[in-house]
Image (cartoon, rainbow, N blue to C red):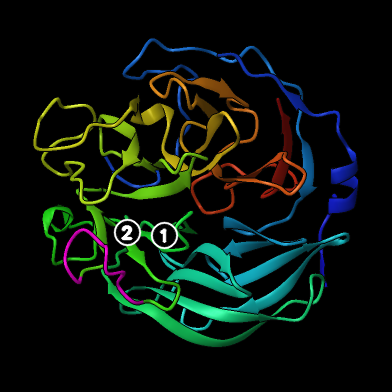
């Protein structure tokens, strides 16, 4: 078993961390933002927060959190390992074969569905989605044989997308980046620069918007977060280039403009984001939705951003500059937020114990 500090049991028992809300190298970006907010609406600032508690420390370039019944799984980008959190720290569930780590590529998104673990990773030739049966019980999970669900997604050292999640329609959604060739985002024949929609077995659902294509929406540069509100509305976070990062409402068949436009353009050909931020204050990655808010983990901006569902053009900032780069956020079984830092991936400034999952109680 790996030796890790801050066991999960102790973290779950700690309820004192309370977060109070009010309401161009074009890559993941490695430097800190300025601590201010710029958006399509007047900026708002955090009213303050107490220190979160550690769930686990000592992670190596982690990328994604997946909650599975009583278990929590984490991907490590460069090692290709899937880890399970335990009361003692973490244990290795397995290593995903075929991962070719480099730049922003490697083992990226995780999702769990019907006792299968779905993984998005960069191979030597492409990005692909592979699933494994999850065997064993929480605390002793293991990976079964691999089955490729989708391959041939263009890859590069940057702009690989990589977030995967099951929607309320029981379909698998996959975010892909333009892999450095911007025209791919507008090409409906390319899998790059898109959000894709598949059945759990990898088939194209008959009600997809573009014939027999897995393409659900297009015109994306590098989307890295997807989540759904209770009313079924789908949201996605997206890295811009030099001007604006975005939060989008995703509608089947819509075109989000990249590379023709970036941010809010008021161009009737494209769907505008509901909120935008200056790139040095955001780099929005994983997102999660609670009853009334969207929570967005930001890399270069080094902050957790809260967007109210009833007014998605506004936002509040939390944890600004306190824990470095933030890669993902998930809603834990107890309703708290688990926030994944990302300081050991070669672009951050690791602190003692990095990387870690932080537990934040919200209200």
Disc 2, SS: loop
203, 260: nearer the viewer: 203
Q: According to the image, label 1 marks what residue?
A: 162
Is the residue marked by circle 1 packed among few (<14), some (14-19), or many (20+) residues within 10 Å? many
**Magenta segment, prevailing SS (helix, strand or loop):** loop
Image quadrant where one finds the C terminus: top right
Q: Report how many numbered discs are placed on residues in the image.
A: 2
Is 280 situated left or right of 193 in this image? Answer: right
Image position, residue 202 (x, y; %)? 38, 76
Image position, residue 131 (x, y; %)? 51, 78
Is 257 situated left or right of 128 in this image? Answer: left
Is disc 1 in contact with disc 2, using a CB cutoff of under 8 Å?
yes
Q: Is 208 one of the magenta-colored residues? A: yes
Disc 1, SS: loop
Image position, residue 211 (x, y; %)? 16, 67
Task: Please indicate, yes or no, whether residue 303 appears anywhere in the rendered image.
Answer: no
Q: Earlier in the sequence, mark 1 or mark 2?
A: 1
Quadrant in the rendering for residue 200? bottom left
Q: Is residue 309 above or below residue 40?
A: below
64, 70: nearer the viewer: 70
Magenta-drawn segment: 203-212
Task: Please indicate, yes or no, whether residue 360 appears anywhere in the rendered image.
Answer: yes
């Amino acid at each position: 078993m790996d030796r890790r500090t801050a066991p999960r049991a102790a973290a779950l028992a700690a309820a004192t961390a309370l977060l109070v809300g009010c309401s161009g190298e074009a890559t993941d970006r490695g430097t800190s933002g300025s601590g201010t907010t710029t958006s399509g609406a007047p900026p708002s600032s955090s009213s303050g927060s107490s220190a979160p508690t550690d769930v686990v420390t000592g992670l190596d370039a982690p990328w994604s959190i997946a909650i599975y019944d009583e278990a929590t799984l984490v991907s490590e980008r460069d090692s290709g390992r899937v880890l399970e959190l335990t009361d003692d720290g973490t244990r290795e569930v397995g290593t995903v074969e075929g991962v070719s780590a480099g730049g922003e590529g490697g083992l990226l998104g995780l999702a769990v569905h019907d006792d299968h673990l779905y993984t998005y990773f960069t191979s030597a030739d492409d990005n692909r989605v592979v699933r494994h049966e999850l065997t064993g019980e929480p605390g002793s999970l293991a990976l079964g044989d691999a089955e490729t669900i989708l391959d041939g997604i263009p890859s590069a050292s940057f702009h690989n997308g990589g977030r995967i999640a099951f929607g309320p329609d029981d379909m698998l959604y996959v975010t892909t980046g333009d892999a450095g060739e911007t025209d791919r985002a507008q090409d409906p024949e390319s899998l790059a620069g898109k959000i894709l929609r598949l059945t759990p077995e990898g088939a194209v659902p008959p009600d997809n918007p573009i014939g027999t294509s897995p393409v659900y929406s297009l015109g994306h540069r590098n989307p890295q977060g997807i989540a759904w509100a209770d009313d079924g509305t789908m949201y996605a976070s997206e890295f811009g280039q030099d001007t604006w990062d975005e939060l989008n409402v995703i509608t089947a068949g819509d075109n989000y403009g990249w590379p023709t436009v970036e941010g809010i353009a008021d161009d009737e050909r494209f769907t505008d984001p509901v909120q935008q931020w200056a790139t040095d204050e955001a780099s929005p990655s994983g997102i999660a939705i609670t009853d009334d808010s969207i929570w967005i983990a930001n890399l270069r901006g080094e902050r957790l951003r809260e967007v109210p569902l009833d007014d998605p053009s506004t936002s509040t900032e939390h944890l600004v500059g306190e824990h470095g780069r933030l890669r993902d956020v998930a809603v834990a079984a107890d309703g708290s937020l688990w926030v994944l830092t990302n300081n050991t991936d070669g672009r951050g400034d690791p602190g003692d114990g990095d990387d870690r999952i932080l537990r934040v109680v919200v209200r």
